[in-house]
Amino acid sequence: MEANVPKRKEPSKALRIKVISMGNAEVGKSCIIKRYCEKRFVSKYLATIGIDYGVTKVQVRDREIKVNIFDMAGHPFFYEVRNEFYKDTQGVILVYDVGQKESFDALDTWLAEMKQELGPHGNVDNIVFVVCANKIDCTKHRCVDESEGRLWAESRGFLYFETSAQTGEGINEMFQAFYVSIVDLCENGGKRPPTNSSTSFTKEQADTIRRIRNSKDSWDMLGVKPGASREEVNKAYRKLAVLLHPDKCMAPGSEDAFKAVVNARTALLKSIK
Ligand SMILES: Nc1nc2c(ncn2[C@@H]2O[C@H](COP(=O)(O)OP(=O)(O)OP(=O)(O)O)[C@@H](O)[C@H]2O)c(=O)[nH]1
């Protein structure tokens, strides 16, 4: 007869993962990693030469994770060193400085560099990306706001966190969510699980909000030629209002974009005789 002894749960095998950091020089990649691993902040800038490497252990749910972190130098000079390290990566920490617009604009270039190095068979859909909007303690110099950063990240299915390596704000939360997503990915057969936010708005909505933000005047914002008729303005307005109405669109920045469109239409109708 079988003894009625509850089976002891086998501890899950430790998982080995590789993560890399990416982003322009001086945005705070090394400081974010140091803040998490060593609980300290280094105020003096010491440029990473090529690559820094470290190993750390973390616990996610009941699983032990051995993390190999490759902290990549952001300076273009180190491209030849970096390009060796993109392969076999499960997670990417993509960092920009909220006070430096170029570092935000460069995120696309970083993604392109990685895709190029992974080659035609490499698939970034099987990698967890977390975007860190870093240096949020420097409020006076901030020029990339939260909705802009969040929109960029979430429209690509990436995680987004506001961080300060200096104060520690957002750092633990960011790493925790990052590692949980990587474990989910590994347990999901290597496919990135959908984030809630990535499914709550469409690419068309995200692209439209970005276009509205970058428009140079009210005509441009509504997507009509200068001198367009009232009918053309109203038609363009209705299309945008349906797309961006706050009841229908959950994309970051949609409320501001909707208000801007309403104001643009009012201003144009006033000016058209
Ligand atoms: N105020 C503030 N300064 C920060 C923060 N994070 C990093 N810094 C400073 O920004 C500078 C650059 O930080 P690093 O972490 O070395 O930057 P990096 O992105 O690793 O740079 P590379 O190694 O050249 O790619 C240093 O002087 C840091 O002290 C932050 O959250 N707030």
Image (cartoon, rainbow, N blue to C red):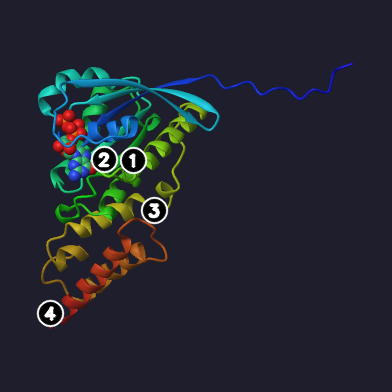
CA separation in Å, label 3 and label 2: 30 Å
Q: Which residue is mark 2?
A: 165
- Residue 182's x, y, as percent? 43, 31
Ligand 1 within 8 Å of the CB at mark 2: yes
Q: Earlier in the sequence, mark 2 or mark 1?
A: 2
Q: Which residue is mark 4?
A: 271
Instruction: Please report contact status of discs 2 and 1: CB closer than 8 Å, yes or no.
Output: yes
Element type where label 1 sits in the image: helix
Ligand 1 within 8 Å of the CB at mark 1: no
**In front of the other: label 4 or label 3?**
3
Mark 3: amino acid: Phe
Mark 2: amino acid: Ala
Q: Residues within 10 Å of mark 3 (few under 14, many from 20)?
A: many
CA separation in Å, label 2 and label 4: 49 Å
Q: Residues within 10 Å of mark 1 (few under 14, many from 20)?
A: many
Which corner quadrant of the figure contains ligand 1?
A: top left
Instruction: Please report contact status of discs 1 and 4: CB closer than 8 Å, yes or no.
Output: no
Is residue 102 left or right of 185 when viewed as pictured? left
Numbered tag placed on residue 201 in the rendering: 3
Instruction: Please report contact status of discs 3 and 1: CB closer than 8 Å, yes or no.
Output: no
Residue sitting at 34 percent across and 63 percent down?
A: 244
